[in-house]
Amino acid sequence: MSSGLRAWARLFTVGAVVAGYVALHLALGAGAALRAQDRFRDAPARAAAFTAALKHPADGAAPPAGIRTGTAWFREHAPDGRTRSMVVAAADAAGAGRISVARARVSGLAAEVRREEAGLARDAAASRTVTLCWAMPAGVLLVPALWLRRRRRAGAAEVVAVVSRFVPRQPWWRRRVYLVADGFGYVLFVVGTLAAQMSQQQGYKMPLTAQVLLLAGGLAALGAGVLVLRHTRPRAVRGAAQALRADGRRPVLYLRSFADDAAAAEVDDGPFVTLHSREEQLAGALGAVGPVITVGRPGEPLPHLGAARFYLPLDDWQPAILRLMELSHLIVLRLGAGDGLWWEVEQARATQPARKLVLLASGRQPGTAARLDAQLPVPSGLDAVVSDDPWTAAVVVFDPSWAPRLYPVGSSAGARRRGPLTRQLARVGRLYRTAMLPLTPTHHLARTLQAALATVDVHARRMAWRATFATQASLWRGFALVTTLGLLAWPGYRALRFFGG
């Protein structure tokens, strides 16, 4: 239900933003039309004075001062059209001493002024009508968007209330300031990336000096963007309560040993500069199910990036975990060392439906399989998984009787059920993604997770795609920010011109 609300809220919001953006452009045009109409308001009197100034002088006489004044007024206030051309032509003739020709030029000036006044009035009315035709749908779409947003947030109110008690308080301005700095870093990152790539493209014909300067400038901007983002991203990240409130769906509770944070914080290499850790990629994949929250390490100066953090007291953390297990849509638990972690496994098995629990196991933890099998009705088979991957070697889900289903990471489980054409298309898609964004260990984990969750009726689409997308989230956010700034620059420029006169 909450996923449907989220999709509809996004649809209505996008519609309201697009209609509002068009209405903003049209409103600026309508304002310009009203201003042109207002500036031309004195045209009848000015035209009468201009015509009167030409009545008495004879041919060869110097043009009277009223001619110069009237011409200057019409040049500044009259729209491009016959009125201005008539006055300018008459002034030119009067300046040459041909007063009779000038009188002939303005013989129909009063009628032309009335026609242009009527035209300006029609343009202003049409601009107002068209603006309203776009502003009204924007307002109409905004109402259900806000209502759905409020209803979606209300659906997450209970879990937000639980988590809010364990999120450190910050000054209201802190995250906003770092978000602005974050945006500056994203812009530097994408501009530097584009400049560095353009300098190396053979298709661009540019002097060697310009190519070297573009490359140096691009690398400097890229490096500055990376430094800014490394400093600002942990400080601008949402806490667990904010993430839950913004999303509205029931969360994915991610439980792990704090000793695994170092491996989760690793950034996989690729052909492009990337800043996003394995945990960020995993959180992006699990975001197909719900917002991902986890317990932060007590005392850490800055939160690790990935799952949204909250911080439990060291001496009384079990009740909060039990309550969050009940409120979560999914419990993803990474097996490891520590009695607290195995207490969580035991409590999840004792208190929660089997379909909610997902176990992640690495390939370098001897004794994990035996300790897990001691709690299950049948062996998991985890001891037979051979892998040197310190991140994740296997995914374990459970049927309603708590019988484990083991999925080694990287296996093609689920692919065998596809038809020949579907397999071929998937192979082509994988080749394309590999060329553009080489597949990371978390991509393979996400594919395995999606296949495993499907067997317990938890359908999460595009998890692998979301994990791959997360590897270049900084680049895409930079592109989105630059595009947004570009879209806002033009109406901003028009607004400055409008209010600046």
Image: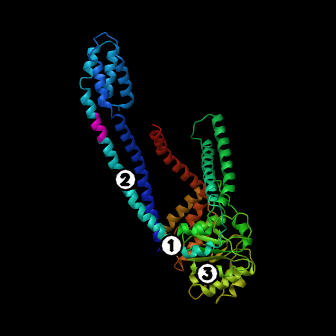
- Give the camera-side residue of 290 and 28: 28
Q: Which residues are magenta?
A: 116-121
Is 117 inside the magenta-drawn segment? yes
Q: Position of residue 420 (x, y in %)?
A: 48, 69
Q: Which residue is mark 1?
A: 154
Disc 1 secondary structure class: helix
Q: Earlier in the sequence, mark 1 or mark 2?
A: 2
Q: Which mark is residue 323?
A: 3
Q: Position of residue 352 (x, y in %)?
A: 59, 84
Q: Measure the alpha-carbon separation of dots 1 and 2.
A: 30 Å
Q: Measure the alpha-carbon separation of dots 2 and 3.
A: 47 Å
Camera-nearest label, 3 or 1: 1
- Residue at the image position 25 percent from the left and 19 percent from the top: 104
Q: Position of residue 371 (x, y in %)?
A: 72, 84
What amino acid type should be assigned to the residue bearing mark 1? Ala
Q: Earlier in the sequence, mark 2 or mark 3?
A: 2
Q: Which residue is mark 2?
A: 134
- Give the camera-side residue of 48 and 260: 48
